[in-house]
Amino acid sequence: MRYVSTRGGTPPLGFCEAVAAGLAPDGGLLVPENLPDFGPELAGMRGLSYPHLCHRFLRRFATDIPQAELLTLVERSYARFDRPEVVPFLQLAPELHVLELFHGPSLSFKDIALQLLGNLYARQCALTGAPINVLGATSGDTGAAAIHGLMGRPGVAIFILYPDGLVSPLQERQMACTGADNVYAIAVDGSFDAAQAVLKEILGDGAFRARHRLAAVNSINIARVLAQSVYYLYAWLRLPPAQQQAEFVVPTGNFGNVLAGWMLQKMGVPIRGFRVATNQNDILHRLFTGGEYRVGEVRPSLAPSMDIQVASNFERFLYYSLGRDTQRVCSVMASIARDGAYRFENFDRDTFTSSSCADREILGIIRQVHRAYDYVVDPHTACAFSGIDPSRPAVVLATANPAKFPDTIRDAIGVEPRHPSLEALKGRPVRRHKIVADAAAIRAFIEPRAV
Ligand SMILES: *Cc1c(COP(=O)(O)O)cnc(C)c1O
């Protein structure tokens, strides 16, 4: 399988090259050159364990990794999840299912993709003998998941920038209390956008990037999207036949999670549809209800990992929606960059519904779900329970362990959820590095510490 750019200006790459590149050199996002049809294989996939299902799926994409090695990589990626099923599929009511995606080492759904990406980077390192330095900016969960995917690996150092004071104390501890020598948690002044801008500037410095073999960990790596398609397949295979029309309800920020499901649907898995569940940062809800994509101001919410107003994976959706016409993708992306907005003529309205959930509703939903089903959801998953109709088949994706957000849960139901891995962090020293949000200062920090 080869990978092409949504903007059409990059020669096709192999899977490993696409993973190493992250962003396409022409500024677009990488997508598989064609999408396989899994329809004929579905019957034979029932009953496969999560790692085996993942292998069955990924072997069609990672065609430049020997099959046996790919299986080992996948098994290693999911061995550290704290449930044998990896992603438990629960039934809360006859028609209402929950897919728990938060049993990885950092307790959010980001682990599913980043454990695999960590193994892919480590493999690349081992093959080439050249170390790599991984850089990322985070509003919380991505940084923690990336660190847990890469810490302690030989030949890899990881530098994560986050806005000082704007990630939760537990999220900060997940990044700054690992005790691993190859992890640098860097607190910068300013917003997540400021951290992101510094990161972009550093990655844009070609000489610096080449000298330290920098790799970016962000939400646009194609390996992340593909790794995430697998759990939609896993859940769909477990739906009772009468409920295969279920809608998948997806807490959404960057559009990475739901895009993975939608791409799977295009590969012959008959998922009926998706609900894009946003918090008060509702750019995608406005798109799917009104047809206009208009970038707004981010308003911090109780579901911080969805506090996003530019959905970076959106360009892949656009590419398929525009019939893979790369020239039109370029012109739409240019008009979004110029005007901050774009009005869509037609897109896949049959497949998508959407909702947005105000902060003031989140506590009530957590309380209500707890009362109705004796089940505790985190604030992101709560956004997906907004307006749920228990008489219509649905699969809600649960994206974070509620123990990551103890204050909100306590405010809602009066008890504070705990998790042993988070409790263990509380006794460890914090190793964070406070640096101004300035590319020269961050480069000076990385220079002597890079591997
Ligand atoms: C990242 C994140 C989301 C949003 O996922 P996207 O891929 O950005 O749409 C939702 N919930 C949690 C807990 C997350 O960490």
Image (cartoon, rainbow, N blue to C red):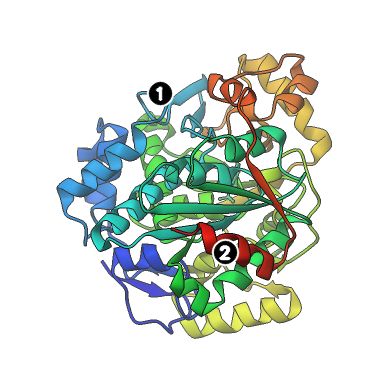
User: Residue 227 location in percent, x, y?
Assistant: 39, 48
User: Which of 176 and 139 lies nearest the eye of the viewer?
Assistant: 176
User: Which of 78 and 52 lies nearest the eye of the viewer?
Assistant: 78
Dot 2, crowdedness within 10 Å: few (<14), some or many (≥20)?
Answer: some
Dot 1, crowdedness within 10 Å: few (<14), some or many (≥20)?
Answer: few
User: On the rendered structure, is 313 left or right of 409?
Assistant: left
| SS for dot 2 | helix
Q: Examine the rendering and report whether any part of residue 313 can be seen.
A: no
Q: Residue beneath label 1, please?
A: 83
For marks 1 and 2 on the same chain, the one whose residue lies earlier in the sequence = 1
- The image quarter in which residue 172 lies: top right
- The image quarter in which residue 84 lies: top left
Q: Residue beneath label 2, please?
A: 314
The answer to whether mark 1 and mark 2 are in CB contact below 8 A is no
Which residue is farthest front? 448
The residue positioned 53% from the left and 61% from the top of the image is 448
